[in-house]
Image (cartoon, helix red, strand yellow):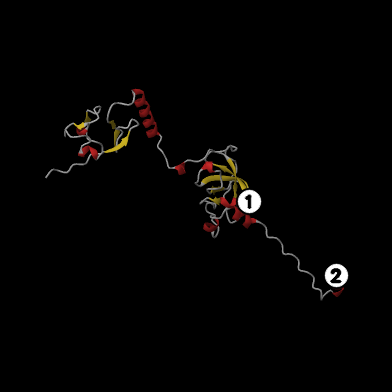
Amino acid sequence: MAAWTQRPIRLPDDHLPCRLDSGRPTCRPCGTAWPCATAGEYLTQSPCTCGEAVWREQRGPRNWHVGPRCYTPADVTRWQAAELKAARRPHYPPSHFYPPKPARPVRQRPPYRHAPAGPGDVALGTWVWVRPGALHAGWGDIHQLAMVTALGLPRCEVWLILDGTVHTARADLLILTASGGRRGEKAPGWTRWTRWTVAEHLAHGRPVAPPAPEPVQAELFPSLAGEAAHA
């Protein structure tokens, strides 16, 4: 019984073809029509523009054209350059391609610094995560780290740390970062309010309107009630 050997990834050189120009290539060691049984396991067939067959390695760059040569050395150079360019710039799924970015103001890092200490405590300099959909599609479909530079409802202004651009984004799509509370000063329930959106923090920080005065009871002031009836 022969000892086990690892199967080569590429077509073994022992089973390369000969007499390709004749249109009837043969395997060098086997003497049979090429591709032989061994070579066939490593090759895939595709038609050429001239109608002849082209055999390509499944896991390698080599290919063999059966029949008279239908291309020039310039064609070969151009194809090789295209293959090298494709190898250096791999193709990604369509989800990785974003539309062109429109013009946005670019600024240096703002001088603000603020770390929220409790619910509703958001101000200029607060770091937030910008959810997908808050920015133009040119900035991708991932969370972006940004600093709040102007507060408001329904939109805030944020400075993007990625490229220094300034955007207006919906306040309900801005989430405080995980390090929302000041170090060593975590208020009760801090793990809850750090997950709030900026819109929720702004709504929480609004002053409560005073209760409206109750109407005067008519039975206590009959004269006022009579005047209202005749009015």
**Label 1 residue SS:** loop
Quadrant holding the N terminus: top left
- Amino acid carrying mark 1 in the image: Pro
Relative side of 217 to 22, left or right = right
Which residue matches tag 1?
A: 154
Residue 133: assigned label: none
Between residue 117 and residue 133, name the one nearer to us: 133
Q: Is residue 230 left or right of residue 206?
A: right
Q: Position of residue 53 (x, y in %)?
A: 29, 34
Residue 20 rendering spot, x and y as whole percentages = 24, 29
Q: Pointer 2: what residue?
A: 228
Residue 165 picture quarter: top right
Dot 2, crowdedness within 10 Å: few (<14), some or many (≥20)? few
The residue positioned 41% from the left and 34% from the top of the image is: 89
Q: Secondary structure at mark 2?
A: helix
Observer-nearest residue: 81 or 159? 81
Q: Nearer the viewer, residue 15 or 148?
A: 15
6 to 116, vertically: above or below: above
Which is nearer the eye, 200 or 28?
28
Q: Which residue in the rendered view is the most extreme toward the top?
A: 73
Give the percent coordinates (x, y) of residue 66: 27, 31
Q: CA distance from mark 2 to mark 1?
A: 43 Å
Q: Quadrant of residue 118?
A: bottom right
Amino acid type at circle 2 is Ala
**Number of other residues with Cα within 10 Å of mark 1, as a class: few under 14, some 14 to 19, many 20 or more:** few
Query: Mark 1 and mark 2 in contact (Cβ < 8 Å)?
Result: no
